[in-house]
Amino acid sequence: MTMTQSVQQKDSSTASYTCFCRACAYREEDDRFRGADNMAAIFLPEGAKGVLGVPSQRKLIIKERIPLGIYEYFMARTELLDSVFLDALKNKFDQIVLLGAGYDTRALRFHGHNQGTKIFELDITPTQQLKLDIIDREQIALPKELIFIPIDFNRQSLPEVLSAVGYEKNQKNLFLWEGVTMYLTQEAVDNPCRR
Ligand SMILES: C[S@@+](CC[C@H](N)C(=O)[O-])C[C@H]1O[C@@H](n2cnc3c(N)ncnc32)[C@H](O)[C@@H]1O
């Protein structure tokens, strides 16, 4: 099985991995290092959720299973992009596009600041469907501005997929492509607008 096929057929383990780190960061005892993602935990498998409540186990996993510096890098990245996302909402951007959104919770967490910005979440079908199933199971209300679009960046043209769901170019738009490009072909990264 090729890497592209395996990505398509299964929900993303790397999305769970970053989500786990955000859920751990939310539980940091030292408030200087505490992350803001209070929703990450709901998207984790039961086993991972169990570990979250035990500080010694969280620390052990971060130390032994996550390469040195990666947890801290994820936390810095989340905090920075949280502020970029929030600024876009406060400045009434027309649209925000999350490319390879995984278990990104910004559209839900910052919903109270949204004054009409449309948010498009793009990801492969299995990851996106699992996220939607969990949102449904947890009875979380989906903001009306939030639109989920399945895509395979390796095979599909980004402008074509976006225009089919009402995305308008030439507006005030923010694109976030967080932790995704390393899983794609070079062609998909260099030229996402190809046909
Ligand atoms: C490391 S996760 C990052 C998720 C999220 N942006 C974050 O930072 O937590 C990589 C994401 O890219 C998505 N992805 C990987 N290959 C893809 C492809 N060919 N087309 C669309 N999405 C893809 C995965 O499903 C996953 O959600």
Image (cartoon, rainbow, N blue to C red):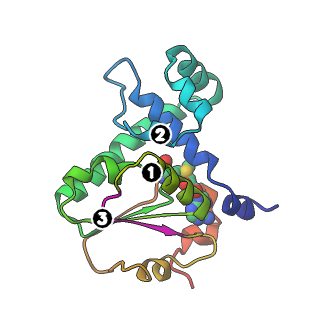
How many other residues sit within 10 Å of disc 3, few (<14), some (14-19) or many (≥20)? Answer: few
Label 3, label 1: how far apart the Cα atoms are? 14 Å
Whether disc 1's CB lies below 8 Å from ligand 1 is answered no
Q: Residue at x 57, y 18 (%)?
A: 57
- The numbered disc on residue 144 is 3
Tell whether circle 2 marks a residue whose Cβ is less than 8 angstroms from ligand 1: no
Q: Is residue 100 magenta?
A: no
Q: Is residue 22 visible?
A: yes
Label 2: few (<14), some (14–19) or many (≥20) C-alpha neighbours in 10 Å: some
Q: Which mark is residue 135?
A: 1
The residues colored magenta run 142-150
Ranked by sequence position, the earlier of labels 1 and 2 is: 2
- The amino acid type of the residue labelled 1 equals Ile
Q: Quadrant of ligand 1?
A: bottom right
User: Which residue extends farthest bottom?
Assistant: 195
Across and down, in percent, residue 94 comes to: 24, 70
Q: Tag 1 or tag 3, which sits nearer the N-term?
A: 1
Secondary structure at badge 3 equals loop
